[in-house]
Image (cartoon, rainbow, N blue to C red):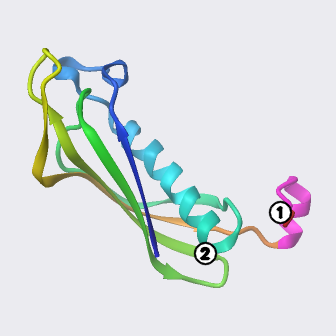
């Protein structure tokens, strides 16, 4: 199972020379896509335990259009291993607003992480009880 989110990267998201966004930008989007995947699979937002690996492969810039994919890699009793990928699908050509859809997406960031569905006991203690 997988989910894909697409969005425009605003120039206001850029923090560095060359309109670069920081690596945390990708990780935030991975969190959003991972939450969506957990809701779709389990009916619960889940709790993110951590990343096993993160690779920053290409820069992401203001003016890019990106897609973020969260794909289930494996499913345990309560844990979910998720593979994430952020791809640039369109890129700004210059400061005039001209841009192009890329013939092939550019893989900018990859990661693998683990989400956990809380047990019903921990749901009640933490106030995370899921009502259907």
In which quadrant is the C terminus drawn? bottom right
Residue drawn where x is 30% and y is 29% of the image: 21
Q: Please check the rendered image and state whether residue 100 is part of the magenta-colored stretch, yes or no.
A: no
Name the residue beneath numbered marker 1: 130
Name the residue beneath numbered marker 2: 79
Residue drawn where x is 67% and y is 73% of the image: 42
Residue drawn where x is 37% and y is 40% of the image: 7
Asked where in the image residue 14 lies, by quadrant, the reply is top left
25 shown above or below 85: above
From the viewer's side, name the closer residue of 16 and 131. Answer: 131
Q: Secondary structure at mark 2?
A: strand
Q: Please check the rendered image and state whether residue 128 is part of the magenta-colored stretch, yes or no.
A: yes
The numbered mark, 2 or 1, whose residue comes first in the sequence reads 2
Residue drawn where x is 56% and y is 58% of the image: 36
Callout 2: 10 Å neighbours few (<14), some, many (20+)? some
Q: Position of residue 125 (x, y in %)?
A: 90, 58
User: Is there any visible trace of residue 57 in the rendered image?
Assistant: yes
Q: Secondary structure at mark 1?
A: loop
From the viewer's side, name the closer residue of 25 and 87. Answer: 87
Query: Which residues fall within the magenta stretch?
Result: 120-130
71 shown above or below 108: below
32 shown above or below 123: above
| Mark seen at residue 85 | none
Asked where in the image residue 121 lies, by quadrant, the reply is bottom right
The label nearer to you, 2 versus 1, is: 1
Callout 1: 10 Å neighbours few (<14), some, many (20+)? few
Q: Position of residue 28 (x, y in %)?
A: 47, 42
96 shown above or below 61: above
Quote the CA–CA distance across marks 2 and 1. 17 Å
Q: Left of 105 or right of it: where is 31? A: right
Q: Left of 85 or right of it: where is 92? A: left
Q: Main secondary structure of the magenta part?
A: helix
């Amino acid at each position: 199972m997988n989910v894909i989110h697409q969005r425009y990267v605003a120039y206001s998201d850029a923090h560095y020379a060359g309109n670069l966004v920081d690596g945390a930008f990708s990780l935030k989007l991975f969190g959003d896509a991972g939450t969506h995947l957990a809701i779709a699979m389990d009916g619960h937002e889940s709790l993110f335990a951590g990343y096993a690996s993160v690779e920053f492969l290409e820069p992401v810039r203001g003016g890019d259009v990106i897609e973020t994919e969260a794909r289930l890699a494996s499913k345990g009793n309560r844990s979910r291993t998720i593979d994430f990928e952020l791809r640039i699908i369109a890129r700004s050509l210059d400061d005039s607003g001209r841009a192009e859809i890329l013939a092939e997406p550019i893989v900018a960031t990859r990661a693998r992480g683990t989400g956990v569905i809380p047990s019903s006991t921990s749901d009640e203690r933490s106030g995370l009880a899921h009502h259907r």
